Image (cartoon, grey):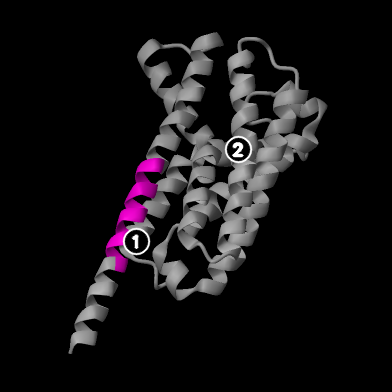
Amino acid sequence: MQSITRTEGIIFVLIIIYSFIPSFGGLLRVLELAGGPAIIPENPRALLDPTPIVLHILSSFLFCILGAMQFMPSIRRRHPTAHRTIGRIVVIAGCISAATGLWMTHNYTFPQELQGSLLYWVRILLGSLMIGLIVWAVVAVRSHNVMRHSAMMLRAYAIGQGASTQVFFGITWMIIAGSEASGLLREIMMVSAWVLNLMISEILIRQLFVRASQAIKSTTAKSMISYKR
């Protein structure tokens, strides 16, 4: 869209790059399960029960990629219909992503080095929280509370993008240590990725509310000046 600013375009491309390994790596898994070549390491859980992981991959891809477009002010202002349409897809995709993540966390059998008690309960907590935030965001926008809607969706997006930050942490550790993290160390790194994402989302939300407050004060001041005249 020509109405997207250069800054927004750069941010969107950076998000796509940041999401590349988990999002597009997941699509390779879907192709493999559909009968394509095995390009990435085998996942026995996916082979035994592929439906949840396929739904999770596809919904997570839509949530992360289309979700990034929802934070572009130009699209929200100049293309409200497109924003609402994409938003409905993002809401559905986000709920499916979180629900299938919860299902796999509880029903798949993971080796201890891949998922211990800490990671299990954090995944259950954040998956449930993600669904709750998305529902809250829908209720907020239907009540015309746009600021609360944006804040809730940004928090949900931070949770949904956890895999991207986890990949970044994992690659960084492999470069430093020369081996892949496992066990409790791996769990701490994965949990830390979600914590970092949520911290960043809170900073962005605070900036959002500050800008909104400044805009309201500016509008009020202009109205007062016009009234005095």
Disc 1 element: helix
Residue 162 seen in this snapshot: yes
> Left of 214 or right of it: where is 98?
right
CA distance for labels 2 and 1: 26 Å
* Count of numbered circles in the view: 2
Query: Which quadrant holds the N terminus?
Result: bottom left
**What residue lies at 51% left-to-right and 16% top-to-bottom?**
186
Specify the farthest residue to the front.
228
Query: Which quadrant holds the C terminus?
Result: bottom left
Q: In the figure, residue 10 lies in which quadrant?
A: bottom left
The mark found on residue 129 in the picture is: 2
Is 12 rendered above or below residue 172? Answer: below
- Which amino acid lies under the numbered mark 2 shown in the image of this protein? Leu
Give the percent coordinates (x, y) of residue 6.
32, 63
Is 120 rendered above or below residue 54? Answer: above
Residue 30 seen in this snapshot: no
Which secondary structure dominates the residues rendered in magenta? Answer: helix
Looking at the image, do the residues carrying marks 2 and 1 touch, with CB atoms under 8 Å apart?
no
Q: Is residue 3 magenta?
A: no
Magenta residues, as a range? Answer: 202-216
**What residue lies at 53% left-to-right and 33% top-to-bottom?**
163
Q: In the figure, residue 117 lies in which quadrant?
A: top right
The mark found on residue 212 in the picture is: 1
Q: Is residue 212 magenta?
A: yes
Is 176 rendered above or below residue 37? Answer: above
